[in-house]
Image: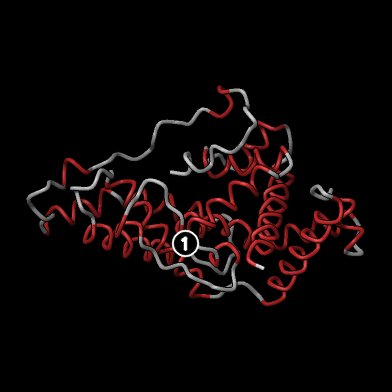
Amino acid sequence: MLESHWSYTGVTPEPKMVARAPSKFKDYTNAYFNQSDQCDPARRHELILAHTPLIKYIANRLVSRLPSQVAVDDLISCGIVGLIDAINKFDPIRNVQFKTYAEFRIKGAMLDELRALDWVPRSVRRKITELTKVCGELEAKLGRPADDEETAATMGLSLSAYHQLLDETKSVSFLDIDYLHQKVPDEIEGDQAAMSVGDSQDPFTALSLSQTREQMVRAINELPKNEKLTVALYYHEELTMREIGEVLGYTESRISQMHSKAIIRLRAKLTKAIN
């Protein structure tokens, strides 16, 4: 789904290293929907059962990045609600696979629940705000993205303390692009794309759709090479942090830090665009 507006990378890894695996989940559009009949109760129940593995997959992928107080069962429950919503609103006349639409609604329901829980401590939000400000100011001053040593020195931190700070804020940064993805879909049109993820204080959702798309493509193109690759491989190719580490030759922890830095830089750029 991200392919069309994330064809930004300008970096081409070896194809064999990033080739996408066949989809784990089958599409049931033709089996359960047609243009003349609604999905009857019996088929609805079958459809929900058939998509249980997809719901669990999405929930586990999200919860793996979150603190332990976020329960995977809660996300699965929200995902079921999102799936039922997808079944009710899916229009087979549109040229969209039900699996694509269902995944969009399932993840959207989970992300909405995470926002409603407000599970991020204020101290972490303050750290993210400070990091965003420092990264933005340094890039404006240097005319390029600052390296780790420069950022750490500006914040009065040792390099190890700076890396620890990236680890502390990674749970939030992991979700930023997921929220944006729900707001700026590429393949789902009209009413089937409407999701509520609004937070006017968040630069990832405060811009209009067209502005967001344009600014994000520009901002991602300006990321350092390895950070740009990390973002592309994680969100587009859906590789894990460990798998990206194997591709780029870094540890899983280092890849996680690259991801966090990339999202902080994107926050800084979008904040500047809003202001």
Color style of the picture? secondary structure
The percent coordinates of residue 46 (x first, y second) are 19, 51
Q: How many dots with numbers?
A: 1
Look at 63% across and 66% down and name the residue there. 274
Q: Is residue 79 above or below residue 221?
A: below
Q: Position of 114 compared to 260: left or right?
A: left
Quarter placement of the C terminus: bottom right
Please name the amino acid that badge 1 sits on.
Answer: Val
Q: Which residue is mark 1?
A: 72
Look at 51% across and 60% down and name the residue there. 179
Quarter placement of the N terminus: top left
Q: Is residue 185 above or below residue 137?
A: above
The residue lying toward the viewer, choosing from 76 and 108, is: 108
Crowd tier of the residue under label 1, counting other residues whose Cα lies within 10 Å: few below 14, some 14–19, many 20 or above: some
Dividing the picture into quadrants, the one containing residue 158 is bottom right
Dividing the picture into quadrants, the one containing residue 78 is bottom left
Q: Position of 112 compared to 18: left or right?
A: left
Residue at the left extreme of this rendering: 36
The residue lying toward the viewer, choosing from 214 and 236, is: 214
The percent coordinates of residue 90 (x first, y second) are 23, 55
Look at 29% across and 60% down and name the residue there. 191
Q: Secondary structure at mark 1?
A: helix
The percent coordinates of residue 119 (x first, y second) are 57, 73
The residue lying toward the viewer, choosing from 214 and 128, is: 214
The percent coordinates of residue 50 (x first, y second) are 26, 48
